[in-house]
Image (spheres, grey):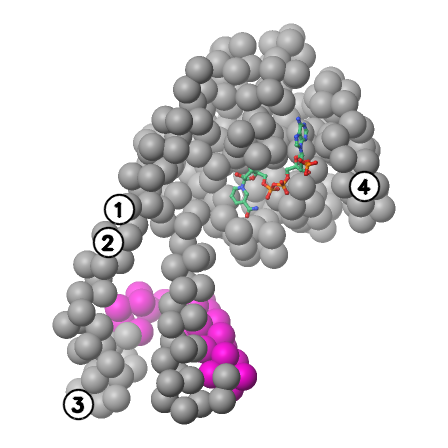
Amino acid sequence: MSDSSIAFIGGGNMAHSLVGGMIASGRKPTSIWVADPFVDQLDNHRHRHGVNVTQENTEAAANADVIVLAVKPQILRDAAAQIASIVQERKPLMLSIAAGLREPDISRWLGGDVPVVRAMPNTPALIRCGATVLYANPSVTGQQKALAEEIMGAVGLCLWVDEEEHMDAVTATSGSGPAYFFHMMECMQAAAEDLGLPADVARQLVLQTALGAARMASEGEDEPGTLREKVTSPGGTTAAALEVLGQEDLAGVIKKALTAARDRSRTLSDEFGKD
Ligand SMILES: NC(=O)c1ccc[n+]([C@@H]2O[C@H](COP(=O)([O-])OP(=O)(O)OC[C@H]3O[C@@H](n4cnc5c(N)ncnc54)[C@H](OP(=O)(O)O)[C@@H]3O)[C@@H](O)[C@H]2O)c1
């Protein structure tokens, strides 16, 4: 655990989760500052985590080694403008978790030539079971990369990509991904009820089955395809269901869905980054 100082601009859900995760991993609360316009939000941070709090973004940013931009994407540009002169003076690492905002736009809003890491986390980060992908611009040092990993690794899996272009596919896969699995659960639950199961039984069975399948796939050696084959006896019940999914081209539908999400991510990033 490094002893560098971390400032959060925006103290909402993600900031709570990241701060909580880092403190649970051994980081000193006094090394963390949280800035937010909302006094209740700051009180919550002080009571829950014992960190330093302020309503002034500039006060939090003043001595930070890394500044985490944890505001909504629509607000980031204004928040960046408030701290740009401090950032230009000190060149701390800027870690943006704002969905859809590209590194060149963030750098430009901060006055240019700044070390920026762009992170794309997903919602399960809120329960420290997230999947985050990171992209660093060329100004980011190895030590700063380790710091970015320490912060995002506090809420789950952390991977790097070398090309920012991949972030749109990441958004389509892990960013929007939890919703696909939630929808699958909804569909299975509704189908199980149609087959006559009581709603609470259907719900519990679907959730436990999703959890069990995810744990088998992530904790064991076998690929998902191998696991599927192992539970599919020829002529059996699973084979009957999978045959229908194949006839209806589930794989093609999923590919179309991810492609639509990737394309929408590109469009939104273009819109967010407009001057
Ligand atoms: N939640 C997720 O699962 C998730 C997943 C992927 C990416 N992200 C990204 O993470 C970022 C934060 O998301 P979140 O869910 O934590 O949002 P959030 O709960 O709305 O938190 C943002 C916080 O920033 C505060 N704020 C507003 N304007 C500010 C300003 N000028 N300076 C400082 N703070 C300001 C907000 O206060 P008010 O409430 O008073 O406006 C709010 O407390 C977003 O950019 C989002 O795209 C989130």
Q: Given the image, on which type of amino acid does mark 3 rest?
A: Gly
Which quadrant of the structure image shows residue 160?
Answer: top left
Which quadrant of the structure image shows residue 171?
Answer: top left
Which quadrant of the structure image shows residue 6?
Answer: top right
Disc 2 to disc 1, C-alpha distance: 6 Å
Q: Which residue is mark 3?
A: 235
Q: Which residue is mark 1?
A: 259
Q: Which residue is mark 4?
A: 40
Give the image location of residue 106, x and y in percent.
Answer: 50, 21
* Kind of element beneath mark 3: loop
The circle drawn on residue 255 is 2
Residue range corresponding to the magenta coloring: 200-227
First along the sequence among labels 2 and 4: 4
Where is ligand 1, by quadrant?
top right
Q: Is residue 38 left or right of residue 272?
A: right
Tag in front: 3 or 2: 2
Q: Given the image, on which type of amino acid does mark 2 rest?
A: Lys
Q: Given the image, on which type of amino acid does mark 1 rest?
A: Thr
Q: Is mark 4 within 8 Å of ligand 1?
A: no
Nearer to us in this view, 97 or 114: 97
Q: Residues within 10 Å of mark 4 (few under 14, many from 20)?
A: few
Tag in front: 1 or 3: 1
Disc 3 to disc 2, C-alpha distance: 28 Å
* Kind of element beneath mark 1: helix
* Kind of element beneath mark 2: helix
Q: Residues within 10 Å of mark 2 (few under 14, many from 20)?
A: few
